[in-house]
Image: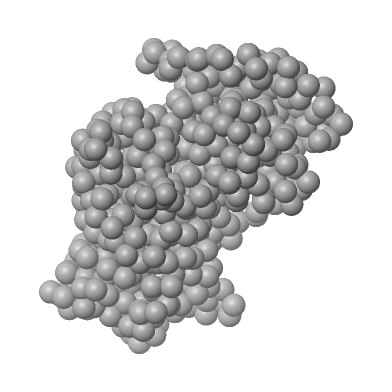
Amino acid sequence: MDDFLKEYAAVLEATRAHRIQEALPLLRDSDKEEVLTRFHPDYKREAYRAIRFGPNQGDETVHELAALLEGDSPLGTEAIDLSQPAYQVDVLVLGGGGSGATAALKAREGGQSVLLATKLRLGDSNTVMAEGGIQVAVREDDSPVQHFVDAMHGGHYKNDPALLKVMVEDAPFIVNWLDSLGVLFDRDDDGNLKVKKGGGTSRARLLACKDYTGLDLMRVLKDSVLNEESIRVIEFAPAIELLTGADGAVTGAVLRNLDTDQRIVVQAKSVIIATGGIGRLHIQNFPTSNHFGATGDALPLCYRVGARLTYPGTFQYHPTGAIHPEQMAGLLVTEAIRSGGAHLVNRAGQRFINELEARDVVCAAIIRECMEGRGIETPLGRHGVWLDIPVIDTMNGEGVVKRRYPGMVRKYGRHGINIAAEPVLIYPTLHYQNGGVQIGTNGETEIPGLYVAGEASGGVHGTNRLMGNSLLDIIVFGTRAGQAAAERAAGTEHGALTLAHLEQFRAQMKAAGVTPETTSPLLLPNYVRRPSEAVGNAN
């Protein structure tokens, strides 16, 4: 352990025996609202402004997203030949993570030709970063109804009930499908699925693959896509603009070859966007747990063709992001560790929140501790609190940490930290895009021919997502969008390829007197974040 931490660690170790006996109650709703209002980043009004034109005109969101939505197309005024598309397919899937791969597989099952285009490599996505598990009601004391109630409460009752209903009801069928593909869910000695409890839930319904669940899901989904010869995959080719027909329906997209900067025109009967979240924009200068491709590409693409966003101003900051050593800043420390019994502890050696509160409440409580001087400062100026992981072995026996959380053990081990013996410093990290493109129960948008699935969509989680519902979301709505897009493609012809929507968008921009700050989607923003720019660097 670094010398500067030893004094604080001694205080933590001295209080461990007492903390094990301590039972912290869950907060009352009024107390939750108070800590959220005072300390959660979503309530920081100076970070927000109104969107000045388009479908969400007047709605407030963070400055970073507002600039993205009001940004101009990368196509600019350049001439592009739309008369001879490079590819003509039934279903075009944009995005190569868990939702995109699922959508491609289901669209192909529907008998349609499929092209999957992705910004980086197939599988490079937030899906592989998801560690904790996937929520599914499988025990006798649980049900989709109880799952619905927990998620609705966690989302502050702002969830779209129709979306949430199909997600929890489809969940058992989704797990059966994933199991049939070869996902290695944890099981007990009798071969039954193991379940564990997540924050904000009333039942244990979290299925996991150790602490690398998303990675294992993506492993089997990627293999399934690559083994399906009828699905064509184009890597390093993100979409930079959608194409529309005379009736406003989406009829294809323009891709950009990142190697050659060539524009690739694709004509499709249905387009599914599953390009993930927004973390790499570093909203409010927060570090992020997100994959490098998570730049919110779906939002400006869909916004320009007239698709409305839901809850565009809400984001999830995961409570436990690493802040030390500096090389790990923003890296997610799975919530499964808190579910397993780890304590959140301030510099005085005190627990200050029940670790199984919903994520937004825990996040706000950690920020409160740091802002009120009860955090610990790193040599590079970040502030955080302890996550006492060794207490898990103290309570359950030596070896439990290494057995349950091998991924975390390896990640910290690369930096000489044994998490079974040493506490680690954490601070909230930008983790998830709660809002997104407004969809129906089959991933359909209000724009004909356009479907959205996974983190790019919004509504199902309300304004706060519970642990384990993201992996469920991407598979459920990837499945539904793939099936619906295939069904539409089977009953329609290819439409004309135009940029008429872009002309209308620019006319709205001019009428609003807006000069765009950027082009969007950004695709590859500046990823370098200096420690002095990070949020955890001051009380």
Please give the name of the residue rendered at 36% of the width and 31% of the height, measured from the top-left corner: 201
Q: Nearer the viewer, residue 132 or 473?
A: 132
> In the visual, does 197 lie left or right of 1?
left
Percent position (x, y) of residue 530? 74, 44
Task: Please say if 158 is above or below 218.
Answer: above
Task: Please say if 448 is above or below 140.
Answer: below
Image quadrant assignment for residue 537: top right
Q: Nearer the viewer, residue 344 or 394?
A: 394
> In the visual, does 153 lie left or right of 217?
left
Q: Nearer the viewer, residue 420 or 538?
A: 420
The reply to whether residue 389 is visible in this rendering is no
Please give the name of the residue rendered at 56% of the width and 73% of the height, measured from the top-left corner: 258
Quadrant of the image containing the C terminus: top right
> In the visual, does 72 lie left or right of 539?
left
Task: Please say if 16 is above or below 308.
Answer: above
The reply to whether residue 14 is visible in this rendering is yes
| Tally of numbered discs | 0
Percent position (x, y) of residue 110? 21, 73
Task: Please say if 135 is above or below 372.
Answer: below
Percent position (x, y) of residue 93? 35, 69
Percent position (x, y) of residue 375? 69, 22
Please give the name of the residue rendered at 76% of the width and 48% of the height, measured from the top-left corner: 415
Image quadrant assignment for residue 61: top left
Quadrant of the image containing the N terminus: top right
Please give the name of the residue rendered at 27% of the width and 75% of the height, measured from the top-left corner: 108
